[in-house]
Image (tube, rainbow, N blue to C red):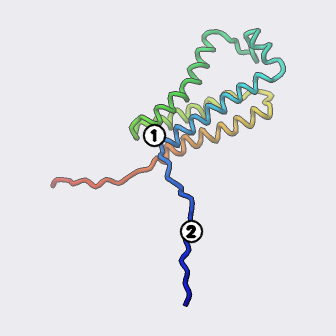
Amino acid sequence: MNSEKKTVTTLEDPKINIKTKLAGLWVVLMFFYLYNDVFTLHRPGFIEGILAEEIEGTQFNQAFLLGAAIIMAIPSVMVFLSLTLKAKANRWANIIVGIFYGGLLLFTIPGGIWAYYALYMIVEAVFIALIVWYAWKWPKQEERRVVAT
């Protein structure tokens, strides 16, 4: 009987910590927001609208720009919070902020949507859904406690 032992090498697939997953999802979401904005600058008439301080009936004033800055700052902060908050607060922060951004995405669907914009909105919706899903399914561990009787 001739038996050979072969060594088989497989790639390691390390488990990714939930905090790292959530932080990564917020980073990717921010990139999609930014690319969407950059591509929008190439639409005919958009730059002219910016220079006229009005696009599709929206006035570009200090209040609008401050609101936009806050809306775009939150995902950046969520990257940090996803890595540093304790599990319970982290989970709820990601669920609540994720749902808020999902609603915001629905609120910002423009009329006469361009194909690139629709694609980005679909991808953004997927990443927002993943943020909420992973936070909702936050891994749990059982604790054994000694209870005095």
The crowd level at tag 1 (other Cα within 10 Å; few <14, some 14-19, many 20+) is many
* Residue at figure coordinates x 54%, y 45% from the top left: 133
Mark 1 is on which residue type?
A: Arg
Residue 126 image position (x, y, % from top left): 64, 42
- Report how far apart the C-alphas of labels 2 and 1 lie in the structure: 39 Å
Between 78 and 132, the residue placed more toward the observer is: 78
On the image, which quarter does residue 58 sit in? top right
Q: How many marks?
A: 2
Q: Quadrant of the N terminus?
A: bottom right
Between 106 and 86, the residue placed more toward the observer is: 86
Mark 2 is on which residue type?
A: Val
Residue 7 image position (x, y, % from top left): 55, 70
Q: Is residue 34 above or below residue 143?
A: above
On the image, which quarter does residue 48 sit in? top right
The answer to whether the residues at label 2 and label 1 have Cβ atoms under 8 Å apart is no
* Residue at figure coordinates x 59%, y 17% from the top left: 67
Q: Which mark is residue 91?
A: 1
Q: Quadrant of the C terminus?
A: bottom left
Q: Which mark is residue 114?
A: none
Residue 73 image position (x, y, % from top left): 55, 23
* Residue at figure coordinates x 55%, y 35% from the top left: 98
Left or right: residue 62 versus residue 140 is: right
Q: Which type of secondary structure does the marked residue at label 1 adopt?
A: helix
Front label number (2 vs 1): 2
Q: Which type of secondary structure does the marked residue at label 2 adopt?
A: loop
- Sooner in the amino-acid sequence: mark 2 or mark 1: 2
Q: Which mark is residue 8?
A: 2
